[in-house]
Image: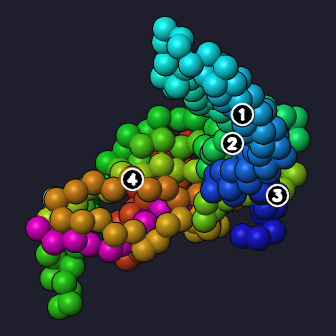
Amino acid sequence: MEENIQALPVKKENDFTQNFSMVLKTTVTKTKTIVIPALHSLVLKLSQILNTAKQKLFNLRTSNPNLGYTPRNNFRGKEKKILTISAIALVLLLGTAFYIGLTRKDSVTLSYSDTRPEAAVAKARQVLDKKFDFPLTDDKGKEAGKIEYIILTAELQDSIIVKGQRAQAVKGRTFLILNLKIVNDNAQGISINTKDYVRLSVNKSDEWIASEVHNDPVEVQAISTKYTRIGFPINDTDKDLTLRIGEINGEKQTLGLDLKPL
């Protein structure tokens, strides 16, 4: 199928953990260059203020021993006010440094990028809702149950998702995608090859094409429903699309397609 598709380049996105580490590193760097020098300057300034205040109060006490108040107790009140103001100034300084670290133009934006590929867009569609019952056989070839094989829609798409990545059809080619629903009402899980039940003919040809896009083998758990798809690479100019549905060694039914542009 490689000649029908070309892989689209995958854009590398920033990793959330790396972004957080870089932001943290930037903030720490800004803190070292802004907060620490400012804090050092603030401590020196406060130390000078405290020493000056202590000296003035000491001089006042020694020169006026009969004051009506105790200078030492008054100093303690002023000391508490100075410490409170210093704590507030420190918090503001740290907050400013953190804000600068996050908002500087050279800082890294902390973000999460969704790297999931966008869903393929259909350019034409036909609703089918055709149900087929196929038998399940055991190791001895005896019928052990049945499955419902339902073709929901047929679509024309210029791209498909292969192993989590988008693959684009080459110029002049496109994909016919059949969306399927497999219903297993049995008490045991099953594994089937969905591509074995459908063939495609184009331009009224007697040649029947097998699916090249599929998720086989598809496992369907007991008493459950599984959604899947099969696809056929075709030419943009192909017309008269006809499906032939049935078991490989069983009876077949034909179904003509008439997809409408979207």
Answer with mark 2 or mark 3, whichever residue precedes in sequence.
3
Question: For numbered disc 3, what is the local secondary structure?
Answer: loop
Q: Which residue is mark 1?
A: 51
Q: Position of residue 119 (x, y in %)?
A: 61, 43
Residue 9 is labelled as: 3
Q: CA distance from mark 1 to mark 4?
A: 80 Å
Answer with mark 4 or mark 2, whichever residue precedes in sequence.
2
Identify which residue is drawn at 61% across, 22% down: 61
1 vs 4, front mark: 1
Q: Position of residue 129 (x, y in %)?
A: 38, 40
Tell me if 101 is positioned left or right of 186 in this view.
right
Question: For numbered disc 2, what is the local secondary structure?
Answer: loop
- Asked if marks 1 and 4 touch (Cβ < 8 Å), the reply is no
Answer whether residue 135 is visible to the viewer in this image: no
Question: For numbered disc 4, what is the local secondary structure?
Answer: strand
In this picture, which residue range is highlighted in magenta?
187-200
**View extreme (top): residue:** 68
Q: CA distance from mark 1 to mark 3?
A: 68 Å
